Amino acid sequence: MTRGLLLSSCDEVAVDAQHAPVDPRVLSTIVERAHARLHVPAQLAVRHAWSCLRTHGPNERFVVGPDTLVPDLWFLAGLGGHGITCALPTALMLAEWMTRGTSTHPLAAAFGPQR
């Protein structure tokens, strides 16, 4: 088993969506912070790096609910890097929309695609 750390800079740098390169400055910052805050060994090296694109809805809010023009098209998008932490509550909100035709969640209107 290979040992290592999975780290993220949690940055939001605008990039060309066709070519989302890993910025070497971001990698350098991650390594520097790991040394300073996590007290990792000095020989820490990046084995693999990738870049993910963060999407946002209007007002940087999530987009959850039914499309207003296309029947049976549903959105759960624009989580802007919060997918892992917000997957369950947003999926439950969407499931409610899909099974009941509406959501009772207090943020349903704020996250709806129709806003």
Image (cartoon, rainbow, N blue to C red):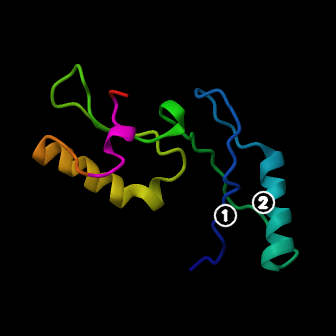
From the viewer's perspective, is residue 78 above or below residue 104? Answer: above
**x%, y% of residue 93?**
27, 51
In depth, the one of 45 and 25 nearer the eye is: 25
Quadrant assignment for the C terminus: top left
**Residue pictured at 40% horizontal, 40% vertical:** 77
**x%, y% of residue 13?**
71, 38
Q: Residues within 10 Å of mark 2 (few under 14, many from 20)?
A: some
In depth, the one of 84 and 100 nearer the eye is: 100
Secondary element under disc 2, as helix, strand or loop, is helix
In depth, the one of 36 and 31 nearer the eye is: 36
**x%, y% of residue 32?**
86, 64
- Quadrant of residue 51 within the rendered picture: top right
Name the residue tied to disc 2: 30
**Residue pictured at 78% horizontal, 77% vertical:** 38
**Residue pictured at 78% horizontal, 49% vertical:** 26
- Quadrant of residue 98 within the rendered picture: top left
Q: Is residue 14 left or right of residue 105?
A: right
**x%, y% of residue 7?**
67, 64
